[in-house]
Image (cartoon, rainbow, N blue to C red):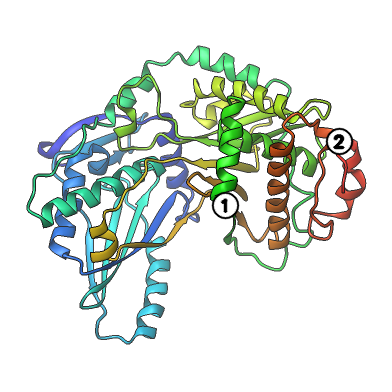
Amino acid sequence: MNTANIEDIYELTPLEKGILFHCLYAENELELYLFQHTFTFRNLDTDIFEKAWQFLVDRHTILRTGFYWEEIENPLQVVYKQVKVPINHYDWRNLDRIEQENKLESFIKSDRESYFDFSQPCLMRLSLIRFTDDYYKVIWTYHFIVIDGWAGSILMSEFPQIYEALVQNKQISLGPTRPYRDYIDWVQEQDIAKTEIFWRQALRGVKRQTPLSYIEMIDKSFSQEQRYDEEIMKISSEGTRTIESLAKKYRLTLPTIINGIWAILLSRYSRQSDVIYGCTVTGRPVDLYCSESICGVFVNTLPIYVKVDTNQSFLSLMQNLQIHLAETRKHEYTPLTDIQNWSEIPRGTDLFKSQLVVEQFPTVELTHYWKEVLGFTEDKVYYKNNYPLNLVIYVGEELLIAFSYDNKIFNVSTIIGILKDIETLLNQFIADPNIQLKYLSFSTDKQRLITSILEKEVSVLGISES
């Protein structure tokens, strides 16, 4: 370790510590916690591209951070003063288009399998591939231990501003930011005893995870390979505005409505009145000044326990859930491993099998220059977590509702059926927020929905089937 180049040393957040040890000891899961973005550019100035990324590395301490864990009880993260941005250049102009596409597919796969050395700073890499004189593919790969979704949006918002300023030979003007250490200090100031009391009360009586067996495939033997697919449903801009207007009228948030719908569906699918699932939160404390500008990993997944009483109204469930979610947010920095230890669910068993993610990140505004001159587009995003069923909500002018799922466990017709159920419940909430849960109906054909067992026993919950 070159001590002359060290800027700072401090402890890890509990979440970072959990990710580090999971990755160090799960050698067969190299792609876990890995994010990979593929972009297309035209007329790219590669020198300025590299300078812009170097500016970001110089600006944000988390991009100059490595981890040290050997021969010490508590691992540390080390921030270095100077770190060169890792960009690899490739020139494939001598290949025909089919060869390029095939080689790109192989490259993307091998890139995912390329292990990050956590002891080295800047746990991200960029691959700049030249297809023609004015056509480039860029692969941006990074590890979740240093960049979460919010931090990724910060970088994707700042990079175009830096690049354009450098092209035009103008001064780079960005808003203030804070080092990641400020968040570390904030976490260490929190009252862990108070947090433990909250989680023990929040999960009291939960003795096992909510099963998904009734919607899983009966025969899972056809493939030994885990592969994540995605199905997406789009709500029109008009429909999205209607939902947002209704949420505002009843002082609800859009995430609360989606959480409520997922709780109802989990209750129906599992045939249990009490359900537990994971909810991913941004984790940026409202009482940490300028936390929205800090680049680093804040996001966390927390257990949400909901008692679904079919005699209550749709609106009542939403209002109660919103109060619970607000209380949860005060403790959203808590590592899931600690919450697991405070729960009544047996050790070695995950708290939940499904998670809900609401993607609400800083908006990335691209100028005419980026859209027309550089022809910038984002082709695809790859990420993988360890939950078999992930409901992901993309908040925007048009609400996108997606499922990322392990297709070894769930078939596509089941996922499409669940999306239809979500749409049906959204429409019923719009039509009558005060409808009692026992009067909710589901329009999805039973052949498209789960198993015949569920069809026969769904009456246990008092939910009618149309």
Q: Which mark is residue 291?
A: none
Q: Residue at x 68, y 48 (%)?
A: 423
Kind of residue at disc 2: Leu
Say which residue appears at 81% left-offset and 30% top-offset: 436
Q: Please, which residue is most extreme toward the left here?
A: 169
Q: How many marks?
A: 2
Are dots 2 and 1 in contact, CB under 8 Å?
no
Q: Callout 1, which amino acid?
A: Ser
Quarter occupied by residue 77:
top left
Of the 4 image quadrants, the one containing the N terminus is: top left
The residue at which mark 1 appears reads as 236
Judge from the rendering whether residue 93 lies leftward or rightward of residue 146; answer left or right: left
Q: Position of residue 420 (x, y in %)?
A: 71, 53
Q: 418 and 313: which one is in front? A: 313
Left or right: 354, with 1 as reference point: right
Residues 440 and 250: in front is: 250
Question: Residue 427 occupies which quadrant of the picture?
Answer: top right
Percent x, y for residue 68? 30, 38
